[in-house]
């Protein structure tokens, strides 16, 4: 089930959302314009579609993985097929722009306490 996180939640709450998923990590898509994220999908593309249905713009959506057992510095992995955007100068599965990475980190820090 895909959840859209708009208010802060705890790591414990987040972990309960992954009970049937990938175990120690979960896929997430962050909307850097609206400061929200979708979690719990099998694919980043599923979460992206859910956010698009809710009014997000594709240019603001970035896929990440959240490693729930790791510390804050290793918690976020910037890796998703939806991040490949040659027209936006992002030619890899990662997030190449450090400014965007920092926005993602700040949003995740605000939403996951």
Image: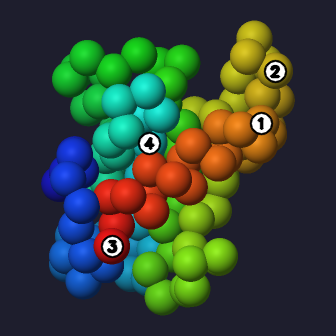
**If you read the primary sequence from the N terminus, does the residue marked by circle 4 or circle 2 appear first?**
4
Q: Which residue is at a point 22% across and 46% down the rendered structure image?
A: 6
Depth check, mark 1 against mark 2: the one in front is 1
**Residue 77 location (% of width, % of height):** 63, 62
Query: How far apart in space, not on screen, are marks 1 and 3 (Cα)?
Result: 25 Å
Circle 4 sits on which residue? 30
State yes or no: discs 4 and 3 in contact (Cβ < 8 Å): no
Left or right: 52 as drawn, with respect to 59: left
Residue 113 is labelled as 3
| Position of the C terminus by quadrant | bottom left
Which sits earlier in the primary sequence, circle 4 or circle 1?
A: 4
User: Which residue carries the number 2 mark?
Assistant: 89
How many numbered discs sit on the rendered protein? Answer: 4
Q: Earlier in the sequence, mark 4 or mark 3?
A: 4
Q: Nearer the viewer, mark 1 or mark 3?
A: 3
Q: Which residue is drawn at 25% across and 75% down?
A: 10
Residue 66 position, x and y percent, is: 49, 67
Disc 4, SS: strand
Q: In this view, does 76 lie to the left or right of 109?
A: right
Q: Could you say which is closer to the camera, residue 68 or residue 2? A: 68
Which mark sits nearer the N-terminus, 3 or 2? Answer: 2
């Amino acid at each position: 089930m895909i959840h859209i996180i708009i208010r802060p939640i705890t790591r414990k709450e987040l972990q309960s959302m992954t009970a049937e998923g990938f175990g120690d990590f979960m896929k997430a898509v962050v909307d850097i314009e609206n400061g929200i994220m979708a979690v719990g999908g099998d694919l980043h593309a599923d979460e992206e579609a859910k956010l698009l249905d809710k009014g997000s713009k594709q240019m603001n959506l970035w896929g990440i993985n959240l490693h729930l057992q790791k510390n804050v510095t290793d918690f976020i992995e910037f890796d998703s097929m939806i991040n490949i955007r040659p027209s936006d100068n992002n030619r890899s599965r990662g997030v190449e722009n450090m400014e965007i990475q920092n926005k993602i980190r700040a949003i995740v820090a605000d939403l996951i306490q």
